[in-house]
Amino acid sequence: MKQQKVPSLLDALTPIVVLVSLLGAAVYLYGDNSSSGPNQIALLFATFTAALVGLKNGYTWKTLEEAMIKGITISLGAILILLMVGALIGTWLLSGTVPTLIYYGLQIINPSWFYAASCLICGIVAMSIGSSWTTAATIGVALLGVATGLGLDQVVTAGAVISGAYFGDKLSPLSETTNLAPAVAGADLFEHIHHMLWTTVPSFVIALIIFIFMGFNADVSADVGRIDEIVGILQGHFNINLLMLVPLLVLLVLAFKKMPAFPAISIGAVVGAIWAILFQGELLQSQIDASQGELIGYFKLVWATFYEGFNISTGDGKMDDLLSGGGMASMLTTTWLIMTALMFGAIMEKTGLLEIFVRSILKIAKSTGSLIASTIATCIGTNVVAADQYIAIVVPGRMFKDEYKKRGLRSVNLSRTLEDGGTITSPLIPWNTCGAYMQSVLLINPFDYAMYAFFNLINPLLAVIYAYLGVKILRVKPKNLEQA
């Protein structure tokens, strides 16, 4: 058996250079369509490059293959959720749930406050259910529809949705990442949440202020006539009333009761299908082949909605785009992207190429400020390279844990930093599992909404400022280091 060699910095840099170069070329050549195949090919070539480095250093192909399979296995839970979210969006369009949310949103939300209100609403919902993904797929999709009706910028709205969803997710004790970070760092969950307030709440308040300012200075192009036209289209094609919000209420209750995401979203999708049959009879009648019989036609249409989504023709192209979509098939490109990204990340971790960067960082991270800044940079880098927020929490957490302890820093400093750098930057990267998911749900490229996801941008920056100023950096006495 060939002995495995410790990789060099050049070894670690080679796959990264290949990846960045190919991803840049994909964006340049294909623009917003880069995530529909070109990015996946770039990730595959980068994976192949990393595998060659691993083979050079003594790893067998079997070992590398097992690492890739394990990496893909980690994503299967997210892929199941992703596919079911596609089904949920389809059935909620057909059932009138999303159109009803858009309808009432147009009635009650003032354009001047819309961006800030969207951010705040998503924050409250995500904190209640502990899921940024579910929040974006339900409330977020509806808010984008409202933005269209009000003549507001959908890209800015997506930034507001992401900001609110990740603020709420980050502080919710029901969130997986909020539980994962303290578990990796060795901290108490509620101490972790309390410690996060110092960086998270100010960042969110600053983001809200920016959204308020943007709302009052927005160029609102919609007039009352266009809003009335949209409302008329919604009422003309869907049965609109508060009862149509029951599928959303069911999903939120199940999430609040801590039911795992996949069965909760599945139930939400099924309830949406049932609601479509019960309350959208006229719409279903217009969509089916009358020769097949009403019952069989309804069943066939609802079944198809689960896998291919819902399409409607209202005579208004923009409204057709707004009210059509969903289906498991719409998530297949995202699934492909997630799988290739995690294959690359798995080989980078298995062959020790990620660890090389951390070792290099620790050589220059002499102060507490530079250590925390380096941890955040490593989390962001891991999100870029390994393409998954869980890996961006676990890998840096394992690598920096001893160093924080050695320097007399309480474990909550590390757990907070893992979230400040890892959790909230994940949706800003198109090939990251979170970025790919958000693009598939909101239909806006992360490269576009990233500059408006103010909370996600401000939070890591504020955490670094706190670190260098020594604000809320908790230390332990030497005799208590073992309990840190």
Image (tube, rainbow, N blue to C red):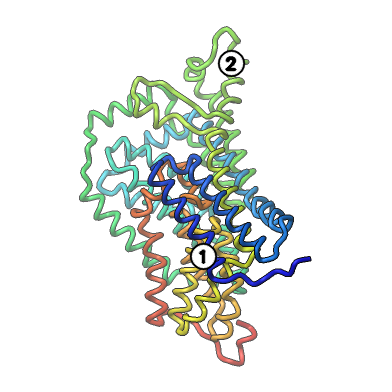
Residue shown at 42%/33% (left/top)? 100
Instruction: Select label 1 or label 2 by which is in front.
Output: 1
Q: Amino acid at mark 1?
A: Leu
Q: Are marks 1 and 2 in contact (CB under 8 Å)?
A: no
Is 194 in front, or is 387? 387
Which label belongs to residue 101?
none
Q: Residue at x 38, y 61 (%)?
A: 457
Badge 2 crowding class, 10 Å Cα cut-off, few under 14, some 14 to 19, many 20 or more, is some
Query: Which structural element holds mark 2?
Result: helix
Is 41 placed left or right of 346 in the picture? left
SS type, badge 1? helix
Q: Which residue is mark 2?
A: 297
Give me the C-alpha separation between circle 1 and circle 2: 57 Å
Residue 216, image x, y percentages: 22, 50
The answer to whether residue 292 is above or below residue 78 is above
- Please name the residue that numbered disc 1 is placed on: 13
- Report whether residue 127 is seen: no
Q: Amino acid type of disc 2?
A: Gly
